Amino acid sequence: MPALIAPSILSADFGNLERDFDMINQSQADWFHVDIMDGVFVPNISFGFPVVKALQKVAKKHMDVHLMIVDPDRYIADFAKAGAQTLTVHYEACTHLHRSLQAIKAQGMKAGIALNPHTPVSVLEDIISDADLVCLMSVNPGFGGQAFIERTYEKVRALKRLITESGSSALIEIDGGVTLDNASLLHEAGADVLVAGNTVFGSSDPIQTIAELKSRTQ
Ligand code: DX5
Ligand code: ZN
């Protein structure tokens, strides 16, 4: 199965958001990837509910929301109302991760766990069967357009083993520095979902670039 392609709207043109949302709707992209940053968990602030709700009105594709915020439990119900379909919290931001995942599912959403580059996959051993998705950060979260951390391939393979051995159905998502050059290697290593910000929005033909990302993971 080809990878699911999830353009990150963090790299969209915020003066032309509706145009960029439409472009994703018309493309072969599978998901919208929505990055929420609070300036505390990560050294950047992105956008909040007004943008997510504007997307909700027009999105024809799955809304994948990545929370890079401290204490995400406070906002789970609000993101469900704003249209999130997968809600991903950071392992590093959740003291009671099991409870957070259950709270996300209780709101009717898929529950994802994101791991920073320094966090080993092995910490997921006792929680993997509760997760619908694991997002491996392949850059330090906070900004689009950063260089891919090569160590990620090993982490994808380790995560794939953990998922297979535990009988979990969690999807593996890769977030940060995904390009036309590493997409097929990531998919071969076991990635199911590829997030792409700069590769899509920095391209002169984003629709064609999304198609190309998709075709490289056939
Ligand atoms: C990084 C965000 C990513 C970012 C990816 O903190 O979580 O989703 O938008 O952007 P690129 O693909 O440009 O690395
Ligand atoms: Zn993200």
Image (tube, grey):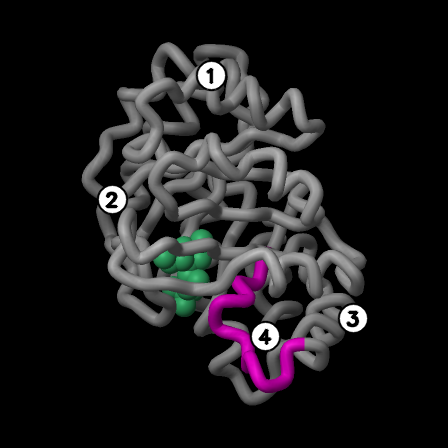
**What is the crowding at mark 2: few (fewer than 14 residues within 10 Å), some, or many (at least 20)?**
some
Circle 4 sits in a helix, a strand or a loop, which is it? helix
Where is residue 151? Give x, y as percent: 23, 46
Closer to viewer: mark 2 or mark 1? 1
Quadrant containing ligand 1: bottom left
Circle 2 sits in a helix, a strand or a loop, which is it? loop
Q: Name the residue carrying label 3.
A: 26
Of the numbered discs 3 and 2, the one sitting upstream in the chain is 3
**What is the crowding at mark 1: few (fewer than 14 residues within 10 Å), some, or many (at least 20)?**
few
Question: Magenta region: which residues?
Answer: 6-17
For image coordinates 35% across by 14% down, the residue present is 125
- Nearer the observer, 103 or 129: 103
Residue 126, compared with residue 9, is above or below; it is above
Of the numbered discs 2 and 1, the one sitting upstream in the chain is 1
Circle 1 sits in a helix, a strand or a loop, which is it? helix
Residue lying at the far left of the rendered structure: 118
Q: Name the residue carrying label 4.
A: 209
Q: Name the residue carrying label 1.
A: 99
Circle 3 sits in a helix, a strand or a loop, which is it? helix
Residue 7 counted in the magenta span: yes
Closer to viewer: mark 4 or mark 3? 3
Of the numbered discs 1 and 3, the one sitting upstream in the chain is 3
Where is residue 93? Give x, y as percent: 32, 34
Q: Which dot marks residue 117? A: 2
Whether residue 21 appears in this view of the structure is: yes
Closer to viewer: mark 2 or mark 4? 2
Please name the amino acid that badge 4 sits on. Thr
For the residues labelled 2 and 4, say whether their Cβ atoms are less than 8 Å apart: no
State the image quarter where residue 23 is shown: bottom right
